[in-house]
Image (cartoon, rainbow, N blue to C red):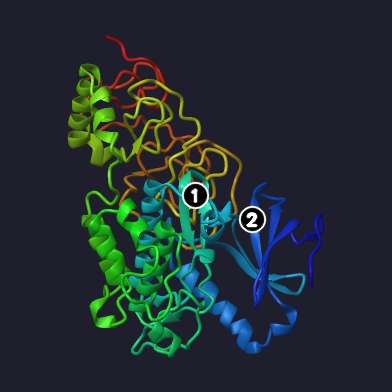
Amino acid sequence: MRLRARQRFGKYIIERRIAEGGFATVYRARDTIEGIRVALKIPFSHLLTSDAIESFRQEVRLAAQLEHPNILSLKYADYIDGQFVIVTSLGQMSLEDRLQKRLPVELGVGYCEQMLAGVAHAHQHKIIHCDIKPDNFLLFPNDVIRLTDFGIARVAQRTLRGSGTGTVGYVAPEQAMGKPSFRSDVFSLGVIFYRLFSGHLPEWPYDWPPLKYDRLEKRLHPDFIELIRRALELDTRKRFADASDMLHRFQKIRSPSRPSRSSSSETKIRRTTKQKWHVIRWKEFQSEFGKALETKFRCSHCEGPISESMFACPWCGKSRESHKHGTKFPIECPRCHRGLKSDWKYCPWCYGPGFEPHSTRHYADRRYSAKCDNPKCSWRLLMPFMRYCPWCHRRVRRKWKIEGSKDKCSKCGWGVLKLFWNYCPWCGKRMEN
């Protein structure tokens, strides 16, 4: 059954067809209840044998096990109007589409780290993806990239079982022979990385160095090139054991891209006395409070360290009603773009309308450190600096404090750091002298 634009399909309004493969068609649709756009993956009716249905159900089960910011989470999977449907968040484009345009080195390196993190999470759950390719990485706002399509993945239980499935050009030689392993996914990542920075897709017999190697030498640090070379080893014993092993090595590489000739002179120009003072101040703050406050991001205006939960920059006072730096949570709020967990019913940061929970299971989290004061609340657990309860939508009345500081904002009463900050990051009020 082919759906048409503007056709109603359950609670969704079809907008257009965005992809079609050998097993299913993917549509862009609008959720009339949540008011957001989603992707609907609908298998072809003539292929829906009992074995095919079981294969799609396996995809749903595998994806449901994986809660990670670099893995596409499932919103819903069920029959709608007699059609089996998998509903996910809607990406902006695939990595394959993005590779049709010039890609800056630093952005490419960021993509590589996120791809490794997503595949490593799957490997930690004993799941081999078996079809790592640019089409299966989707891009989201703030340069977030997520792995999708676990349709032919295999679970490593007592033995690793699989078939020679995969995509020509990215499949590892041993996987093509029906013997996939975690190292097969590593090989596919190596192929993507090589193409990403050279513009060339390595081919059999994968002799090193492949064509366009000179482009890698011009753009990447030798340590990063060695990481790619090791991932592309034909001898599986010489490759990284899995994506976690490869990610660990990646994180040890301090300077993945070569600095440009002008970078040293530009750095000298930027290093004025005032900027040095700010850098020292930020470093002291990060050392003492950075971990507790999770200030992992930088203000787009002054570059000072900020956290996802802050609604104003504490250094320059710039408003942060919308968070534009990505999130480590599995889902983003479509309004404020801050992170959500799969079982939350409401955004605890911006007080928007409700969501349809992605899971009925309550997930534990070490960040839960307080309780909602509503005795009728279903779960009651709160994370620091939440403004509203994600379970019952009640406004949080407690005045959040910062461990190690007795300072508080004269306007909102929440904890601040007068020694470091110029503004309250929770309400935006300028600090009193």
The three-letter code of the residue at mark 1 reads Arg
Disc 1: CA contacts within 10 A as few (<14), some (14-19) or many (>=20): few
User: Helix or strand or loop: what does disc 1 sit on?
Assistant: loop
Q: Nearer the viewer, mark 2 or mark 1?
A: 1
Query: In the rendered view, would you say 410 is above or below 135?
Result: above
For the residue carrying disc 2, how many other residues have a C-alpha within 10 Å: few (<14), some (14-19), or many (20+)? Answer: some
Residue 408 sits in which quadrant?
top left
x, y percentage for residue 148?
51, 65
Element marked by disc 2: strand
Label drawn at residue 79:
none
Q: Is residue 110 above or below residue 387?
A: below
**What residue do we see at 43% from left, 75% from top?**
203
Q: Residue at x 82, y 58 (%)?
A: 7
Q: Which mark is residue 102?
A: 1
Q: Amino acid at mark 2?
A: Val
Give the mark nearer the N terminus: 2 vs 1. 2
Q: Is residue 340 visible?
A: no
Residue at the disc numbered 2: 38
| Residue 33 seen from this side | yes
Q: Residue at x 49, y 52 (%)?
A: 331
Q: Are marks 2 and 1 in contact (CB under 8 Å)?
A: no
